Image: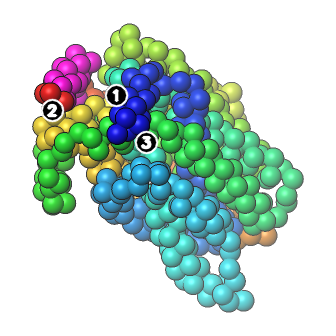
């Protein structure tokens, strides 16, 4: 009994401490794998389907849409299940990451194989379509299995308002750093391997190994802190768990949560549409090289976003999350307009616009994810339960539905505009003016509309630092009453 009390005191001591550098680094490493794989998929999967596998742009966009819709559907389910998971050895979230890491890597790799179902290229299109749909669905399921429990750990690692912004700065340092690493690897692999299909296979293999290692570093690095939180949570008397349908009603009656998912949806719709169209913009409109210029322009965006993360994190403590988000988005909107009016040959201006966009992209990474834990504490105050999994699950669900629709539109807009796909071993075709105009619309005006919608929602977001402090004070008073 004495040992149990001593263990409880030790666990409380761990939670009362500020997060140390080791824990922040370990937590950040958990986003390395999902970031690398997602980055390669966002930037290159659409162009891989159209220019290597030889799938028409409309069908390629449909493959991505199906994968994203399924990815969104399984998010709330996995979130609900992680909330219900019980493991004294690993807690609620870590078992999912531990057992899901290797399958996650394997099915990511299988997306970059081009099976030959028929010697006739036209007869190979539909079998390839269904192959990529099946692999994409399974791959997205394992992405959720490792990534959603990871994101749901943020409020379990620290309950401090500003410390969460700091923690997310480390997370997105690894996230954006992983994205940059993947682009550097892309440049190296593409420059060394001439065969277009082979270069994607080698790149996918390297990224798979790095991704799995990053996830295991996170699992073992944050385990002590997570188990301390879990022990405290189990000690706290909670009301009887509500049915899943009832939980959904409560989640969507949480007004600040609606604002956060809207902000995140519009921010990341702009990010994903821009990311998927940039390779087409650089190669087909600007007339530059896929193997060297595409990675460099993407590194300019992601590198700037990485450098700005800690700047924005420090500024948010002084001027608030809303103002930081507004500043970043305004710069991004100016950059999007600049890209639309850019002319072939204006390479320096293209890099200037990329840097400006990167400044804005960093706030899209940082701010929405630092808002969601505050929403979860408001829900805990109202219901007496902590349901990180279901909140993160539905946040990502709606985001992915939006992204699925966006990617579907991009793919079909390219096909409707007369975009010409190619196959491995063949030179890239010259695109018609209608396709080039569609690419410019997707890189400029469409992201701008999304960003403006996000700005409106951010303006009306209700939870301030003062409101959060009041929520935490009331939660502490409730815990003190239960302890007496």
Q: Which of 33 and 470 is in front in this view?
A: 470
At 18% from the left and 44% from the top, the residue drawn is 238
**Pair 2/1: label in front:** 2
Element class at badge 2: helix
Tell me which colouring the rendered structure shows: rainbow
Q: Residue 482 carries which label?
A: 2
In the rendered image, which quarter contains the C terminus? top left
Query: Extreme top residue here?
Result: 318
Q: Which of 37 and 5 is in front in this view?
A: 5
Q: Determine crowd level at label 1: few under 14, some 14-19, many 20+ residues with C-alpha closer than 10 A.
A: some
Residue 463, position in %: x, y?
Answer: 22, 26
Residue 177, position in %: x, y?
Answer: 63, 36
Q: Determine crowd level at label 2: few under 14, some 14-19, many 20+ residues with C-alpha closer than 10 A.
A: few
Q: Earlier in the sequence, mark 2 or mark 1?
A: 1
Q: Determine crowd level at label 3: few under 14, some 14-19, many 20+ residues with C-alpha closer than 10 A.
A: many
Q: Is residue 111 above or below residue 435?
A: below
133 sits to left or right of 474: right
Q: Which of marks 3 and 2 is nearer the N terminus?
A: 3
Residue 144, position in %: x, y?
Answer: 45, 57
Specify the segment rendered in magenta: 461-480
Q: Which mark is residue 227?
A: 3
Q: Which of marks 3 and 1 is nearer the N terminus?
A: 1
At 51% from the left and 42% from the top, the residue drawn is 223
To which residue does mark 1 refer?
A: 159
Query: Extreme front residue here?
Result: 2
Q: Which of 28 and 335 is in front in this view?
A: 28
Q: Is residue 472 above or below residue 289?
A: above
Q: CA gap, disc 3 to disc 1?
A: 15 Å
At 35% from the left and 12% from the top, the residue drawn is 319
């Amino acid at each position: 009994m004495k040992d149990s009390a001593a263990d409880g005191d030790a666990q409380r001591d761990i939670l009362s401490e500020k997060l140390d550098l080791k824990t922040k680094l370990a937590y950040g490493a958990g986003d390395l794998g999902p970031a690398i794989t997602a980055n390669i998929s966002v930037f290159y999967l659409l162009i891989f389907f159209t220019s290597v596998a030889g799938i028409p742009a409309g069908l390629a966009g449909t493959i991505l849409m199906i994968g994203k819709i399924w990815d969104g559907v399984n998010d709330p389910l996995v979130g609900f299940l992680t909330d219900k998971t019980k493991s004294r050895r690993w807690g609620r979230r870590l078992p999912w990451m531990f057992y899901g890491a290797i399958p996650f890597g394997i099915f990511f790799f299988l997306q970059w194989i081009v099976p030959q179902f028929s010697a006739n290229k036209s007869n190979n299109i539909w079998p390839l379509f269904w192959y990529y749909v099946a692999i994409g669905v399974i791959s997205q399921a394992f992405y959720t299995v490792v990534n959603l429990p990871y994101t749901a750990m943020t409020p379990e690692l620290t309950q401090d308002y500003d410390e969460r912004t700091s923690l997310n700065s480390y997370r997105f340092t690894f996230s954006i750093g992983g994205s940059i690493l993947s682009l550097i690897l892309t440049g190296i692999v593409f420059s060394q391997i001439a065969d277009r299909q082979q270069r994607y296979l080698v790149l996918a293999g390297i990224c798979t190994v790095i991704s799995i290692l990053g996830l295991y570093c996170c699992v073992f690095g944050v385990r002590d802190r997570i188990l301390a939180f879990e022990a405290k949570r189990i000690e706290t008397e909670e009301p009887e768990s509500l049915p899943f349908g009832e939980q959904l009603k409560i989640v969507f009656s949480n007004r600040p949560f609606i604002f956060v998912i809207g902000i995140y949806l519009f921010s990341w719709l702009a990010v994903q549409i821009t990311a998927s169209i940039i390779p087409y913009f650089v190669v087909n409109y600007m007339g530059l090289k896929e193997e060297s210029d595409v990675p460099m322009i993407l590194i300019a965006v992601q590198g700037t976003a990485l450098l700005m993360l800690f700047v924005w994190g420090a500024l948010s403590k002084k001027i608030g999350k809303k103002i930081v988000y507004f500043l970043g988005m305004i710069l991004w909107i100016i950059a999007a307009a600049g890209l639309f009016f850019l002319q072939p040959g204006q390479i320096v201006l293209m890099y200037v616009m990329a840097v400006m966009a990167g400044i804005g992209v960093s706030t899209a990474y940082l701010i929405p994810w630092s808002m969601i834990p505050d929403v979860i504490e408001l829900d805990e105050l109202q219901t007496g339960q902590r349901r990180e999994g279901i909140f993160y699950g539905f946040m990502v669900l709606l985001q992915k539905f939006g992204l699925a629709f966006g990617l579907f539109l991009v793919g079909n807009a390219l096909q409707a505009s007369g975009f010409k796909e190619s196959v491995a071993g063949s030179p890239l075709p010259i695109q018609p003016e209608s396709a080039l105009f569609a690419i410019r619309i997707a890189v400029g005006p469409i992201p701008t509309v999304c960003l403006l919608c996000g700005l409106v929602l951010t303006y009306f977001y209700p939870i301030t630092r003062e409101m959060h402090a009041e929520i935490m004070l009331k939660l502490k008073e409730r815990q003190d009453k239960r302890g007496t």
